[in-house]
Image (cartoon, helix red, strand yellow):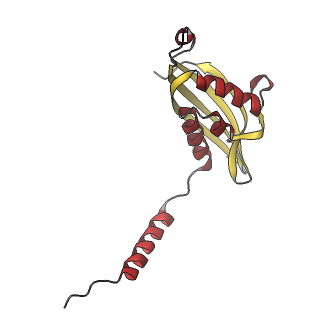
Amino acid sequence: MKREPKVGVIAVALSVVGLAVACSRAPADPVRSLLDELVAAGEARDADRFGARLSAGFHGPDSMDRAAAVATLRRYFAAYDSIAVEVYGVEIDREDGAARVRCVVELSGQARKLAGLEGLLPPAAAYRFELEVADEGGVWTVRDASWQETGPAE
């Protein structure tokens, strides 16, 4: 007579296999995870989600603080129906819970169909960014950012 395995034995076996797979994966790079989250927030046009990854003491160009950065993003995001973000040429210099990140960010989007807005907003742009990022209480955030417009990759 054939015996069926007990459900408990199957559950334990699956748990062991799942644990082995989880332990075999390398931990996610927190700096790259931060960049991925910023891209996802940008593509979702979610200024608050993006702002949550800016340090409370964030500094940007022209004395831009976190509140001004989020307000600026909110205005830009509202002007587009969709936004695509591509990040490449990422260089990361790490040092004790912080890093300097250099990268190129290409943005493309579909402007909202409002009178005159389509001609004023560019359908694509590229910027070279320099970011100072750091672990703040277990969450990686952007402390400082600067950027300049550049041409897209050939």
* Front in this rendered view, residue 52 or 58: 52
Residue at x-position 54% and y-position 13%: 114
In this orientation, which residue lies closer to the viewer: 114 or 91?
114
Q: Is residue 40 above or below residue 10?
A: above
Name the image quarter holding the C terminus: top left
Q: Is residue 151 above or below residue 17?
A: above
Question: Which residue extends farthest bottom?
Answer: 1
* Residue 153 percent coordinates (x, y): 49, 23
Rendering quarter of residue 46: top right
User: How far across and down, in percent of the image, does residue 43 sit?
Assistant: 53, 33
Q: Residue at x 63, y 39 (%)?
A: 49
- In screen coordinates, is 144 left or right of 152? right
* Picture quadrant where residue 89 is located: top right
Q: In which quadrant is the N terminus drawn?
A: bottom left
Check the image and report above or below for 50 versus 74.
below
Horizontal side of residue 20 vs 147, given as left or right: left
Q: Position of residue 78 (x, y in %)?
A: 60, 24
Determine the residue positioned at 34% across, 83% down. 6
Q: How many marks?
A: 0
Along the viewing direction, whichever of 1 and 33 lies nearer the viewer: 1
Residue ID at (27%, 84%): 4
Q: Could you tell me residue 28's position as x and y percent?
A: 56, 53
Q: Is residue 140 above or below residue 60?
A: below
Compare residues 150 and 34 and report the one nearer the observer.
34
The quadrant in which residue 48 appears is top right
